[in-house]
Amino acid sequence: SEPLQCALRGHEHVVECVAFSSAAADRALAPRLEAAAASVSQNGDAAGGRRSGGLHVVSGSRDRTIKVWQAATGACLFTLTGHDNWVRSVSFQPNGKYLVSASEDKSVRMWDLQQQRCLRTVSGAHEHFITCLAVHPGLGLVATGSVDQAVATWVAAPTV
């Protein structure tokens, strides 16, 4: 079997979802990465050498939190709180500045990664728990799926 690269530990309940960052998200998170750069080798075999994204991992959990991690070291850079139920899906927006999350609290939230805060909440997005989401790479849309057997699309703007 393959050796484990890194274990990201810190959630207090089951992890429901994970996503790797894009190159744009890595640029948006660069100030956070610089703080942890001392632990990364200078020969390009870890975070310093990658150019195509994936320097960060985001995770959503039944503990109602979202964590942003440095993939190479497993360091938790910050935790986002605000959902009132399990976080079921997370995705970076294509521009890398924002993260979108869906929860069993029936909400979709857009987070500013640099400011580490929620910019927009769509409450009551579905009649029942939201189980998944996808962000369109070019149209600025978010699609969500739910236990209510419906798919909904949303404009992925930070403010309305």
Image (cartoon, rainbow, N blue to C red):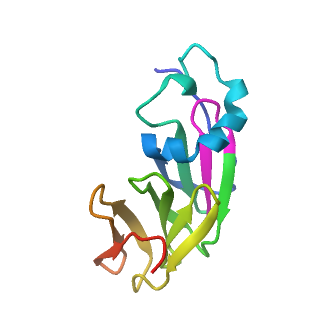
Check the image and report above or below for 28 versus 113: above
Pick the front one: 106 or 3:
106
Check the image and report above or below for 86 versus 138: below
Pick the front one: 159 or 80:
159
- Image coordinates of residue 114 in percent, x first then y, are 61, 55
- Image coordinates of residue 137 in percent, x first then y, are 30, 55
* 36 displayed left or right of 87: right
Check the image and report above or below for 14 versus 118: above
- To which quarter of the image does residue 63 belong? bottom right
Placement of the C terminus among the 4 image quadrants: bottom left
Q: Report if residue 4 is visible in the image.
A: no
Q: What stretch of residues is rendered in magenta? A: 64-76
Check the image and report above or below for 8 versus 110: above
Residue 152: say if magenta. Answer: no
Image point 54% across, 41% down: which residue?
56
* 35 displayed left or right of 58: right
Image point 33% across, 65% down: which residue?
140
Residue 75: say if magenta. Answer: yes
Q: How many labels does the image show?
A: 0
Image point 64% across, 36% down: which residue?
74
- Image coordinates of residue 116 in percent, x first then y, are 64, 60
- Image coordinates of residue 30 in percent, x first then y, are 59, 41
* 4 displayed left or right of 134: right
Pick the front one: 8 or 95:
95
Pick the front one: 133 or 52:
52
Q: Report if residue 17 is visible in the image.
A: yes
Q: Which residue lies furthest to the top in this view?
A: 43
Image point 44% across, 37% down: which residue?
53
